[in-house]
Image (tube, helix red, strand yellow):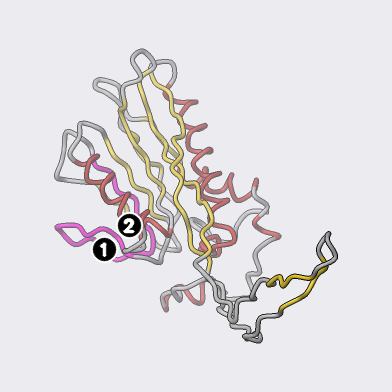
């Protein structure tokens, strides 16, 4: 059963679904590109592990602040005093961190494995200032923009902070950015509204090879079907935050 949305489904942005969607979309993009770029190139996944904090409500339990002494007989028949462990008077919690695996799609030459293009699919931690994954990604992004590698950034998340651009672009819930190594600092931008179909993107290769087409809409649709999201999502409830724009509320309903 397909998604009721023509492009990106905002309900997939819920934390319970996003990690599964992210990894499967990266795999789907790799497979689609490998059907296009061989034999001169290949696409592969590069994992990156970070940690996500799970919030657990703090609870404090008060226990008696009393030590108990117990006498036990010794082998010689004499008794000696042995102290039992004093129980902690209160309990608290520490941040619970779980590993989160993120994937990058890389295109390399088959002959020398030269890195040609990097495709990043943003996750919530990439857009959360203060999180170590945001800091790591900011450094990686800066290094890529200073390199001779083409760089594509796919942002299918409405929430979080985006990296600023020098010139304003139309406001939209979703974006794709493409920075070609030979055209920097200029970048191509695809603003994507909730009602829009996802674009067919040009994935740069080395000259004189033409761009490889990536049908992002078909990739997302395939992942939606394969992940059985239709039976996991309750479309009678609001999507995860942020709230939909006013013009999209009637469309969602």
Disc number for residue 170: 1
**97, 18: nearer the viewer:** 97
The extreme top residue here reads: 111
Q: Is residue 12 left or right of residue 44?
A: right
Disc number for residue 196: none
Q: In this view, does 149 lie to the left or right of 230?
A: left
Tell me, yes or no, whether the highlighted magenta stretch contains residue 170.
yes
Q: Is residue 248 left or right of residue 16?
A: left
Against 232, residue 243 (above or below) is: below
Characterize the magenta stretch by its predominant secondary structure.
loop
**103, 205: nearer the viewer:** 103
Secondary element under disc 2, as helix, strand or loop, is strand
Q: Where's the C terminus, which quadrant? A: bottom right
Residue at x 44% of width, y 73% of height: 242
Residue at x 67% of width, y 58% of height: 230
Q: Where is residue 130 in the image (x, y as percent from the top left)?
A: 32, 63
Task: Give the magenta-colored segment's residue range.
Answer: 161-179
Marks 1 and 2, the one that precedes in the sequence: 1
Secondary element under disc 1, as helix, strand or loop, is loop
**Mark 1 near mark 2, Cβ–Cβ under 8 Å?**
yes
The residue identified by callout 2 is 191
**17, 93: nearer the viewer:** 93
CA separation in Å, label 1 and label 2:
7 Å
Residue 92 falls in which quadrant of the image?
bottom right
Against 58, residue 126 (above or below) is: above
Q: Where is residue 48 in the image (x, y as percent from the top left)?
A: 43, 42
Residue at x 41% of width, y 42% of height: 200
The crowd level at tag 2 (other Cα within 10 Å; few <14, some 14-19, many 20+) is some
């Amino acid at each position: 059963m397909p998604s009721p949305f023509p492009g990106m489904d905002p309900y997939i942005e819920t934390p319970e679904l996003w990690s599964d969607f992210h990894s499967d979309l990266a795999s789907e993009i790799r497979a689609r590109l490998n059907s296009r770029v061989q034999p001169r190139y290949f696409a592969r996944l590069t994992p990156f592990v970070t940690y996500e904090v799970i919030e657990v409500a703090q609870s404090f339990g008060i226990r008696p602040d009393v030590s108990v002494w117990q006498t036990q007989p010794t082998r010689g028949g004499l008794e000696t005093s042995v102290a039992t462990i004093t129980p902690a008077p209160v309990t608290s919690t520490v941040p619970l961190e779980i590993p989160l695996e993120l994937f990058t799609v890389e295109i390399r030459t088959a002959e020398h494995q030269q890195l040609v293009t990097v495709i990043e699919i943003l996750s919530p931690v990439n857009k959360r200032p203060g999180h170590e994954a945001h800091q790591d990604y900011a450094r990686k992004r800066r290094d890529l923009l200073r390199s001779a590698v083409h760089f594509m950034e796919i942002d299918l998340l409405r929430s979080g902070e985006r990296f600023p651009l020098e010139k304003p672009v139309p406001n939209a819930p979703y974006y794709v950015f493409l920075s070609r190594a030979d055209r920097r600092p200029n970048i191509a931008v695809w603003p994507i509204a909730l009602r829009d179909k996802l674009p067919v993107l040009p994935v740069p290769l080395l000259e004189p090879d033409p761009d490889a087409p990536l049908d992002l809409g078909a990739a997302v649709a395939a992942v939606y079907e394969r992940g059985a999201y239709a039976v996991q999502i309750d479309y009678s409830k609001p999507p995860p935050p942020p709230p939909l724009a006013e013009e999209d509320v009637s469309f969602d309903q």
